[in-house]
Image (tube, rainbow, N blue to C red):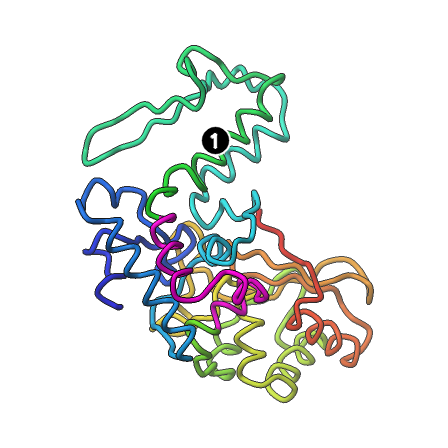
């Protein structure tokens, strides 16, 4: 299994947000003649691992986990695939005067050293994006990045997986739960996690909310709960081999786990910025309230993702 996920195999590449999680390499069809058979084989191995309760070392990124579960991907998931494109499309949606950018319904892709122009619609090289059609363009550009580029290898992977374990059996899980089933729960060193954490927005290591946070993580959460909390903030439950001090952000730079203070009271949920490995917390009025918030978060009852 590890050999198939090795970068040299050409089947998978690291996700845009780190060098820990894997995603399908869109160039795989160009580097291997039997890529469909290989992805089909990987799918069967994943299915057997789930059936047998065995864990694998490679971690899959969030969009790929969603694909395995038949869960629709969202615009925020684009950041795990192409963080720069995620920012660009977000800007296009939220700003006027797009025609000044001279963008067309095309995508320039490098394939084995050669640049290819892909039209998103027939005649797309002659259709400029403007404020009237920008929503349609963003939808098509997003779909191309998230689905069209990998549809063939992804289909082979899913065929192999569902031959071993039907979709109906695994569709009850969330992407986070599926990651834990596939990869297991690694031991989280709370001392090293806390020592490597940064604080911002007015928080310090001696702030009451921060003290409560670490006491809850250390005393109230078991190892699985800590992994789910890490997963909420960073996008994966896996700690880099170099420890928390080597956590990477979407730009490939070191982005240490950060707790930032935000405005709000007890009704304000925490927010996660997976691109920065940052969790935003208001100054809760008591440790009891914060405990309840974190427990609900781990059980999946808090929707606090902010992928910008």
Residue 140's x, y, as percent? 50, 29
Residue 160's x, y, as percent? 35, 58
Q: Quadrant of the N terminus?
A: bottom left
Asked where in the image residue 159 lies, by quadrant, the reply is: bottom left
Q: Is residue 158 magenta?
A: yes
Residue 227's x, y, as percent? 52, 75
Asked where in the image residue 138 lies, by quadrant, the reply is: top right
Quickly name the residue at label 1: 141
Per the image, label 1 sits on a secondary structure element best described as helix
| Residue visible at 51% across and 82% down in the picture | 190
| Residue visible at 66% across and 59% down in the picture | 271
- In this rendering, the answer to whether 216 lies above or below 76 is below
Q: Nearer the viewer, residue 65 or 95?
A: 65
| Residue visible at 23% across and 49% down in the picture | 35
10 Å crowding of disc 1: few (<14), some (14-19), many (20+): some
Highlighted range, magenta: 154-180
């Amino acid at each position: 299994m590890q050999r198939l996920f090795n970068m040299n195999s050409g089947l998978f590449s690291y996700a845009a947000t780190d060098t820990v999680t894997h995603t399908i390499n869109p160039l795989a069809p160009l580097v291997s003649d039997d890529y469909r058979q290989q992805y089909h084989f990987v799918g069967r191995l994943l299915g057997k691992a789930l059936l047998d309760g065995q864990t694998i070392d490679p971690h899959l990124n969030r969009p790929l986990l969603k694909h395995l579960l038949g869960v629709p991907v969202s615009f925020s998931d684009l950041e795990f695939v192409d963080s720069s494109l995620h920012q660009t499309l977000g800007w296009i949606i939220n700003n006027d005067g797009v025609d000044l950018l001279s963008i067309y319904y095309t995508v320039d892709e490098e394939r084995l050293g050669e640049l290819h122009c892909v039209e998103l619609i027939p005649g797309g090289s002659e259709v400029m994006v403007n404020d009237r059609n920008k929503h349609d363009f963003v939808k098509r550009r997003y779909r191309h990045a998230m689905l069209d580029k990998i549809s063939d290898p992804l289909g082979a992977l899913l065929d192999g997986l569902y031959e071993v374990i039907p979709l109906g059996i695994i569709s009850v899980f969330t992407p986070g739960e599926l990651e834990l089933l596939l990869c297991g729960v690694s031991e989280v060193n709370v001392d090293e996690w806390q020592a490597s954490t940064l604080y911002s927005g007015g928080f310090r290591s001696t702030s009451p909310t921060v003290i409560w946070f670490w006491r809850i993580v250390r005393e109230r959460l078991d190892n699985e709960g800590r992994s789910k909390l890490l997963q909420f903030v960073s996008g994966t439950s896996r700690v880099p081999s170099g420890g928390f001090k080597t956590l990477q952000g979407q730009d490939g730079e070191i982005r240490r786990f950060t707790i930032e203070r935000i405005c709000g009271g007890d009704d304000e949920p925490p927010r996660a910025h997976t691109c920065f490995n940052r969790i935003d917390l208001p100054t809760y009025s008591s440790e009891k309230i914060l405990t309840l918030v974190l427990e609900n978060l781990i059980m999946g009852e808090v929707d606090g993702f902010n992928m910008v």
